[in-house]
Amino acid sequence: MKTGMFASQQVWRISAPTDSSGTIVITGDDVPELGGAVCVGAATSGFVIHVRQSTGAIRAGGQSFILIKATRQECLLDVTVSFSLRVFIEFEDGEAFTGDARIWTVTHGKTDHASLKDFRLSGERELRVDDIPSDATLVLRCKTFRAGFAPEFQFTLTPDQLKLEPTCRIPRSDPPHCGLIVQLGQAASTETFAVRVFKSSGSVVDYGTVSSDADFKTLKLWSGQAYRVHGRGRTSAWESEDIFLKKDEVKTLTAEPLAFAHVQLQVVDMTGKPLWPAVLSFNVHRYSRLDAARKPRSSASFGDQGFARADGDGKILLRDAAPGTRMALVEALGYEPKLVDVSVKPGEILDLGKIALEPAKGHISIKLTNRRDGASYYVALLEPGAGPLCKPIQTDKDSLSFEALAMRRYVVFVYVAEGQKGTSQPVSLTAAHPAAAVDIDCSKVEYGR
């Protein structure tokens, strides 16, 4: 049957049910303008039909209809089938997956970069993916911090495997097989230094102490990953460069702590107006916790974390930082972050002056589906692994949006009341794709009693 027409393109929308064999048959009675029959095969009701441009037809949407450009010639249209699917992810012991997942497709040996999507799952087994071409291979890369399991694992799923809605199991990891030993150099004092070993993502792998009498030793590391070691005392600190270990390698490092350094600056917009909340961080691989910067309008410095927040005038003073050359990240809510090269000497107070940030242009549109009649929902925009960037919005409407967002990853979280289970969806904004639209299924929200 005809359900609509786009006048500018003369496109008819047609729908029809599948028969017992999963075939959709649209006859000439359904499309009198076409003058011929169109047969579309579909293996499951979850398939979405796309008609190739080369046939004079345009891309379709929906689950049981196709879009066909009006034509009077006799033809049987050639179609490709793209489908929505479910992939289940769990650990080898059967526990639901918690961590980050990234997917993309490969067709005839070529990676489709536009298909790349990021997800963050928290105790969920099911990952639903849409618009996968029927002849494409899906690559799924999982990252988790659960002890005893591979921290990163990749699955490659063929079209035949995808049709079976496969279960991907994260295997148990080999025991850590690499290590580091940290010794104090001869110039170091007799005090004891706290040592922390970080992965490139910024998470702490191991920690302990080192002194002139006792070395620090860890055997909890894996090959193929980058590590960085921080050592701090009462008045001095030391940081290593990135360390890459080979299988079964144990590397010895000599720490030469140097006097603390200090870095100060003022964060402003392009007109020179001070910005708040704003932060300075030396941990460029981690989010700077802009939610934490919304504390009382006074500056605060956490030299051991390489992090400081601005006061009400946008001024930041990072005290007791480890000296050296590194990259610093300057951020303010509603503005694009900026990377700054910093080289600070032992005992120096380095003044970076005014750092001007450009307004952020990211945009996230949110549609709430399967809403309960009369219910209102809280919608929060979170930093991954952190808190809300702004006060959650309470709404009884089915759509809303967040503006002036920096190009980065976010998590949209929807819930009804504090303490009750909600549902979330990760979103990535990039310079190539500064706007995103998200559908949130409110049927997954806990309503309480």
Image (cartoon, helix red, strand yellow):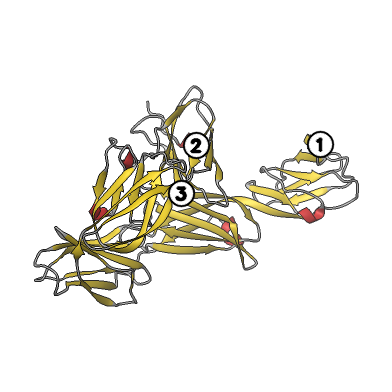
Upstream in the sequence, badge 2 or badge 1?
A: 1
Marks 2 and 3 in Cβ contact (< 8 Å):
no
Dot label at residue 409: 3
Q: Is residue 328 visible?
A: yes
Upstream in the sequence, badge 2 or badge 3?
A: 2
**Disc 2 vs disc 1: which is toward the camera?**
2
Q: Is residue 183 left or right of residue 266?
A: left
Q: Tag 1: residue type?
A: Ala
Give the quadrant of residue 342.
bottom left
What is the C-alpha distance between the residues marked 3 and 1?
Answer: 39 Å
The image position of residue 411, as x and y in percent, is 44, 44
**Residue located 67% across and 42% down the image:** 62
In the depicted structure, whether residue 323 falls above or below residue 417: below
The image position of residue 24, as x and y in percent, is 74, 46
**Residue located 35% across and 64% down the image:** 172
Upstream in the sequence, badge 3 or badge 1?
A: 1
Give the quadrant of residue 389.
top left
**Residue located 27% across and 42% down the image:** 299
The N terminus, quarter of image: top right
What is the C-alpha distance between the residues marked 2 and 1?
Answer: 33 Å
Residue nearest the viewer, comparing 383 with 177: 383
The image position of residue 315, as x and y in percent, is 32, 43
**Disc 3 vs disc 1: which is toward the camera?**
3
Residue nearest the viewer, comparing 380 with 56: 380
The image position of residue 46, as x and y in percent, is 62, 47
Q: Which residue is mark 1?
A: 7
Q: In terms of secondary structure, where does tag 2 sit? A: strand
Dot label at residue 402: 2
Give the quadrant of residue 253.
bottom left
Q: In terms of secondary structure, where does tag 1 sit? A: loop
Marks 2 and 1 in Cβ contact (< 8 Å):
no
Q: Tag 3: residue type?
A: Arg
